[in-house]
Amino acid sequence: MKTIQKALTVLNQFSETRPVLGITDLSKATGINKSIVHKILQSLMEGDLIARDTETRRYRLGSGILKLAGRHLANLRPLDIARPHLLQLWEETSETIHFVVQDNLSTMITQVYESPRSLRVSSHLGEIGSLHGSAAGKVFMAFGTESLLDRFLETELEALTSHTITQPEN
């Protein structure tokens, strides 16, 4: 495994449910030697992609991630076009509104307008979803290109819930 691939593997271990991790956690999750994980984390800290809590000595994503995400979002032209319409829909319905883009064989939320209601869908900016396990993903498959559908159906469909359809013929 090349160094950059290892660094990406380490970065991808951080999630909403596991926002703070130690070297041992990362080594076990990735199968990468602890000393190499440590070196990767040190390099990522230099770029502010990882930050270290001085008290717990554990790691979390750093502010550099937001800088990169901001650069990415700044170049999403469709979002600029859609934003006034999303805002109008949110104001008219008071429901949670998502702007979702297709990212390879996944979806990614690039804009969220949260509902002010106490009972609401809650999602986060940058959240990744599957094409077959999300409403937005199903829209991309239904109205996307035939080649997208063909590429997707070549992959093994993961059961996300007990009701997830995992057989293409279903």
Image (cartoon, helix red, strand yellow):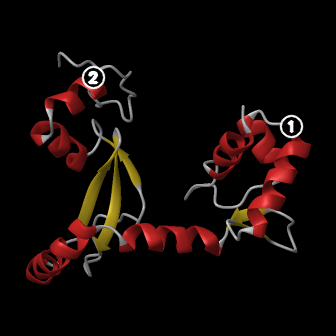
User: Which three-letter amino acid code belongs to the residue tagged 2?
Assistant: Leu
- How many numbered circles are shown? 2
Instruction: Judge from the rendering whether residue 84 lies leftward or rightward of residue 157; answer left or right.
Output: left
Query: Is residue 51 at least partly visible in the picture?
Result: no
Disc 2 to disc 1, C-alpha distance: 35 Å
User: Which three-letter amino acid code belongs to the residue tagged 1?
Assistant: Asn
Mark with earlier residue (2, 1): 1
Seen from this angle, which residue lies furthest right? 35
**x, y (%) of residue 158?**
40, 28
**x, y (%) of residue 74?**
37, 74
Count neighbours of disc 2 (C-alpha within 10 A) and say few if under 14, some if 14 to 19, many if 20 or more: some
**Could you say which quadrant of the image residue 162 lies in?**
top left
Name the residue carrying label 1.
Answer: 33
As helix, strand or loop, the secondary structure at mark 2 comes to helix
Q: Which mark is residue 142?
A: none
**x, y (%) of residue 82?**
16, 72
The foreground one among 73 and 59 is 73
Determine whether 107 is above or below 168 in the image. below
Name the residue carrying label 2.
Answer: 153
**x, y (%) of residue 2?**
72, 36
